[in-house]
Each structure stands twice: as C-alpha cells, then as structure tokens.
Amino acid sequence: MIRPRAVTAVAAGAAALALAGCGSTASPESSSGGAAARISVSDPYIPLPPSPDAAAGYLTLHNSGGSADRLLRVASPDARSVTMHRSTTASMEPLESLTVPAHGSAAFSRGADHLMIMGLDDRPRVGRTVELDLTFAASGTITVKVPIQPVAYRPPGAGN
C-alpha cells in the first residue's frame, strides 16, 4: 500500500527540483537562453559633413547569437565625442543604449536612430575613414573603420 505522506513528499521534492530549474540568475543580455551574442557590423558610413564640427554616422548591427546584447557606448580616437540619438518629429533625444536582439539586427539609419560624431580631428573628405569603438554589454568592444561617403550615398539595399 502506498502511503499518502510518502507520495506527498516525493511530489513536493519533484516540484522543488522542477522549480529550481526555472530560476535564473542570467543577465538581461543572456536571458533568451541561447548561445552568447555574436555581433557583426554592416554598411557603416558617414555622409560627407560640411565641417568637422558635427557629422552623422550610420551602420547596421547584426546578432547571429542566441542572446540579446546592448550597445552601451560609442567612442572614437578621431573625434571629440560620439553619442547615440533617436530622431523624433520635433527633435533628437539621446539614447542610453541600443538593444540588438538575438538572431536579429538594429540599425542607425537616416531619420531614425543615428550616431552624432562631434569634433572630427581631420577635415572630412570622401574616402577617409573614422574609427568607431562600439562597446557592448556582453560582447565587449568592436572597432569599425567607417568610410566618409558622398552626401547622397545610400548603402546597397537601403531602398534607394
């Protein structure tokens, strides 16, 4: 004969083990439960600005990994500062970070999220490059050489 107390104790133990497996101490960047984020960059460019005082930067971030990551900071040895912004109907708002979803992408593009590059060291000229250091919460820092392109440039596939 099976005793009700023994069954209750076994059931309680099994439930505790199941619930222990459900707990998570993962950070938001790894909460999707997959492999680590794998960030790559495509289509980086800076439209030729009229002066070195201010330029906009655009690029697409891809994440082929199983966990989201966040771009926390952008810096450049070729400029005084680089900040992330979001364009709204009436103004620009600073972005604290930009999430790149697992198996997804996030873009800095014209009329939307973009990079503001202030105080370039050299006079901008088509063909020159600007180094950007992209720092992510989980993936660390990725360095990208961003070419200065003609003002009307659009990357391939950008709906030209």
Image (cartoon, rainbow, N blue to C red):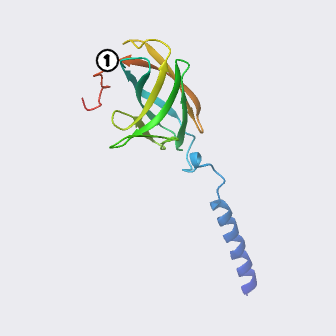
Which quarter shows the N terminus?
A: bottom right
**Mark count:** 1
Q: Name the residue under label 1.
A: 150
- In the rendered image, is residue 43 in sight? no
Residue furthest toward the left? 160
Q: Residue at x 36, y 43 (%)?
A: 88
Identified at 66% across, 53% down, the residue is 25
At mark 1, the secondary structure is loop
**Residue 133: image location, x then y, percent:** 54, 25
Q: Where is residue 76 in the image (x, y as percent from the top left)?
A: 54, 22
The answer to which image quadrant residue 140 occupies is: top right
Is 36 placed above or below 42 here? below
Q: Residues within 10 Å of mark 1 (few under 14, many from 20)?
A: some
The residue sitting at 47% across, 12% down in the picture is: 122
Q: Nearer the viewer, residue 45 or 6?
A: 45
Quadrant position of the C terminus in the picture: top left
Looking at the image, can residue 55 be seen? yes
Horizontal relation, residue 18 to residue 117: left or right = right
Residue 77 shown left or right of residue 10 in the figure: left
Amino acid type at image mark 1: Pro
Quadrant for residue 47, please give it: top left
Query: Looking at the rendering, which quadrant does residue 86 occupy?
Result: top left
Percent across and percent down for residue 59 are: 41, 29
Residue 55, percent across and down? Answer: 41, 24
Q: Is residue 104 placed above or below 126 in the rendered structure?
A: below
Residue at 55% x, 33% y: name it. Answer: 73
